[in-house]
Image: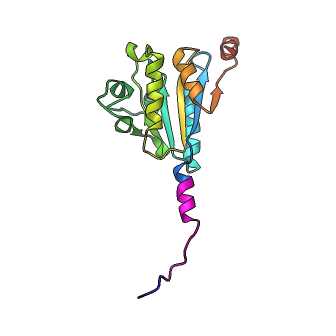
Amino acid sequence: MAENTQPHDQAAGLRIMTQAIRPVKVIAIASGKGGVGKTNVTVNLGVALAALGKEVVLLDADLGLANIDVMLGLHPQYNLLHVLDGTKSLRDIIVEGPSGLKIIPAASGVKKMAELSTAEHAGMIQAFSEMDQHIDVLLIDSAAGIADSVITFSKAAQEVIVVVCDEPASITDAYA
């Protein structure tokens, strides 16, 4: 019987275990008012993290006026509306963006998406925890203002970045 000549790596199992339980870093990007560059910050932060070797997913959580896909020149066939109506899973709607970014697009101009209940927001967040795809960072590009969806997504995040510009209304609304 031949002996195994490979050295035994005692830490291999431990490394596999710790990688499997590594939590996803969730960062919500918010603003008090629209037009301050929140989506630009989200996309550029995603590209920078991907360049560092992180697996990054961008969630377009401006559910009524989504535009990450527009900003990136993407034309997704499916979006979060298809997940909410049960015809697609989150995995089905993810599209590949630049630098290996994964994008979860939302619908734009769909009133139903802008009026989701708190329970529907919570269900969407729960769906993310059930994804079987490896993710290092989930960036949530929320809507502007203090709507229920912004609060729900911000509470689900470990970190919140509030984007402002040098307009008094932007700063005042950011405090809200």
Which residues are the magenta region?
5-18
Please, which colouring scheme is shown? rainbow
Counting from the top left corner in percent of width and height, residue 22 is at: 56, 47
Q: Which quarter of the figure is the C terminus placed in?
A: top right
Residue farthest to the bottom? 1
Q: Is residue 126 magenta?
A: no
From the top left corner, tell me how far across and down residue 130 is, in percent: 44, 38
- In the figure, is residue 87 to the left or right of 1? left
Q: Along the horizontal axis of the image, is 98 left or right of 165?
A: left
Residue 70 visible somewhere in the drawing: yes
The answer to whether residue 18 is above or below residue 58 is below
Coordinates of residue 119 in the picture (x, y in percent): 45, 19
The image quadrant where one finds the N terminus is bottom left
**Which residue is painted at 49% across and 22% down in the image?**
62
Residue, far left: 87
Residue located at (67% from left, 11% from top): 169
